[in-house]
Image (cartoon, rainbow, N blue to C red):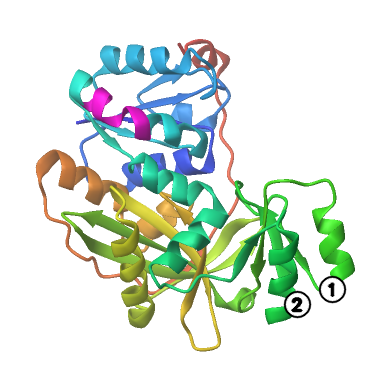
């Protein structure tokens, strides 16, 4: 089979490629990215350049690439491309005989906006951190009166903790809001030792498999993950997946409260940056999704290896002629 992975320069895209290389699939791998110096391009069997996702030429280039390579599956490796593929999924699948692993636009929109994420989970009774729009002065005052400090101030649309701050008093709160729009202000739940990342695979109207890992963060990314069974949290995470109803993978990031319940503050309606870590723990979600869609292989909950996954830097050398050959 043949797989196309976009976003080969992103942590997500590279994680998908790593998971494919760890799998038992007999896979020809095509990678694509706007930047010819993206390392993931040089882990693939063929590499292509793409316009940026907001470029009007992006859609035409995707059509051209799918027509040329005819991949069996398309795996989206960067957030900014999700909306395009969600909107175009049915057309692309019909026209080019492929499978695009992306959720529908409703799910992508809920996950893309952290305030909408909170509103969604509140609407289905799953108790997210209390959240208000940063421009809603009355709502902010009600939040402060109800729960006090600390509070978390963050962009409604963002990733990797960019622009996120924890404020401990009114002066810090007002400073964090100065000249900024598109903010959400949230209850600060738990502490860094109660931080988790979890994923589900949703097919046939139910969650087919799930995994929970406790994690340590550095610069907004997971740099240590603690694997194990976490049975109670897995049950809660499956409830989250059943409420959201993604197409295939979804990732939930949360802290647990004093009662040990997950309080989700972020959804990734896709694979995530910790996808290759989960594959190392025995949960190769990329392989399971591909086998389900291409070969109709039922997804069976895998046994999770117990241990600690440590992340580290690595390097690679790319000859100039390989860089020049990226089309």
Is the residue 289 above or below the residue 278 in the image?
Answer: above
Distance (Cα) linking label 2 and label 1: 6 Å
Q: Decide: marks 2, 1 in contact (CB < 8 A)? A: yes
Q: Depth check: 113 or 67 in front? A: 113
Query: Residue 4, percent across and down?
Result: 33, 29
**Residue 21, image quadrant:** top left
Is residue 91 visible to us here?
Answer: yes
Image point (51%, 25%), residue name: 53
Residue 169, label in figure: 1
Which residue has dot 2 on it? 149
Which stretch appears magenta? Answer: 86-93
Is the residue 191 above or below the residue 248 in the image?
Answer: below
Image point (46%, 27%), residue name: 42
Q: Which quarter of the image is occupied by the N terminus?
A: top left
Give the residue at the far bottom of this rendering: 259
**Residue 229, image quadrant:** bottom left
Q: Is disc 2 placed on a helix, strand or loop? A: loop
Which one is earlier in the sequence, the residue at label 2 or at label 1? 2
**Residue 258, image quadrant:** bottom right
85 displayed left or right of 187: left
């Amino acid at each position: 089979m043949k797989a196309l992975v976009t976003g080969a320069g992103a942590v997500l895209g590279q994680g998908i490629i790593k998971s494919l290389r760890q799998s038992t699939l007999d896979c020809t791998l095509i990678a694509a990215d706007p930047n010819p110096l993206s390392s993931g391009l040089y882990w693939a069997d063929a590499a292509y350049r793409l316009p940026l996702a907001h470029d009007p030429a992006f859609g035409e280039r995707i059509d051209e690439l799918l027509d040329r390579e005819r991949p069996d599956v398309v795996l989206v490796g960067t957030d900014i491309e999700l909306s395009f593929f969600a909107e175009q999924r049915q057309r692309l699948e019909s026209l080019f005989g492929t499978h695009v692993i992306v959720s529908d636009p409703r799910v992508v929109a809920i996950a893309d906006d952290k305030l909408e994420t909170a509103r969604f989970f509140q609407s289905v009774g799953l108790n997210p951190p209390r959240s208000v729009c940063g421009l809603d002065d009355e709502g902010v005052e009600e939040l402060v009166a109800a729960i006090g400090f600390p509070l978390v101030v963050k962009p409604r649309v963002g990733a990797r903790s960019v622009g996120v701050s924890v404020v401990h008093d009114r002066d810090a709160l007002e400073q964090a809001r100065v000249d900024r729009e598109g903010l959400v202000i949230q209850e600060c739940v738990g502490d860094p030792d109660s931080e988790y990342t979890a994923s589900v695979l949703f097919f046939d109207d139910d969650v087919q498999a799930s995994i929970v890992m406790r994690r340590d963060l550095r610069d907004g990314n997971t740099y240590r993950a603690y694997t194990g069974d976490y049975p109670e949290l897995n049950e809660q995470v499956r409830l989250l997946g059943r409420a959201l109803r993604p197409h295939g993978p979804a990732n939930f990031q949360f802290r647990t409260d004093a009662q040990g319940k997950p309080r989700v503050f972020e959804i990734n309606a896709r694979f995530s940056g910790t996808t290759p870590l989960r594959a190392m723990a025995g949960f190769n979600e990329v392989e399971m999704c591909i086998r389900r869609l291409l070969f109709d292989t039922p997804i069976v909950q895998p046994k999770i290896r117990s241990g600690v996954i440590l992340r580290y830097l690595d390097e690679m050398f790319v000859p100039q002629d390989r860089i020049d050959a990226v089309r």
